[in-house]
Amino acid sequence: MNSGKSASAEHSWENPGTYNLTVRAVDRWDEKSEWSDVRNVTIGRTFHSDPTPLDLETVTMIVVLIIRVVLIIIGVILIFAGLLFIASPTRAKDVVIEIGIPMKVTGKYMGGVGLALILIGAMLLGSAMLV
């Protein structure tokens, strides 16, 4: 290689850490240059580009967690709706609830509807703990 030309080399480390590097050139006649100044190189953890496939147990745990979260959210919403029906029967007199089909609830049934919503919400919360 002619003087002033660039060269490259590769090396890999098995363990992470900080390494002190020095280099020197050797020509075809085995003439060697002076050693370079020390350069510090820090090697971190290596990451594999291939993702680990999920096994059935992990997928099952994720699905169960999602079901639990959904049941808890719906249960809490129903409990708060039930409390609204019980606490404000006059304000919620013409509330339209959509449970499959829209229906109007009159004032005298508000307490019962509120209690039913609270019970359904509580059952969903309990179901979330059993899943």
Image (cartoon, grey):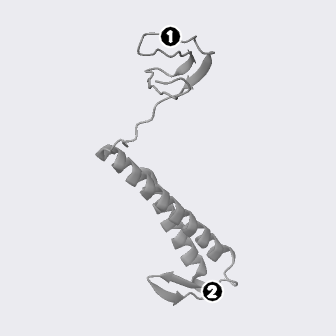
Amino acid, disc 1? Lys
Q: Residue furthest left?
A: 56
> Residue at point 53% right, 71% down?
117
- Sequence-wise, which precedes: disc 1 or disc 2? 1
The one nearer the camera, 51 or 127, is 51
In this rendering, position of residue 92 left or right of residue 120: right
Residue 88 x %, y %: 69, 78
Above-or-below relation of 5 to 40 = below
> Residue at point 58% right, 10% down?
34
Amino acid, disc 2? Gly
Q: Secondary structure at mark 2?
A: helix
The one nearer the camera, 57 or 50, is 50
Above-or-below relation of 23 to 65 = above
Q: Which residue is mark 1?
A: 32
CA gap between label 1 and label 2 equals: 98 Å
Q: Which residue is mark 2?
A: 107
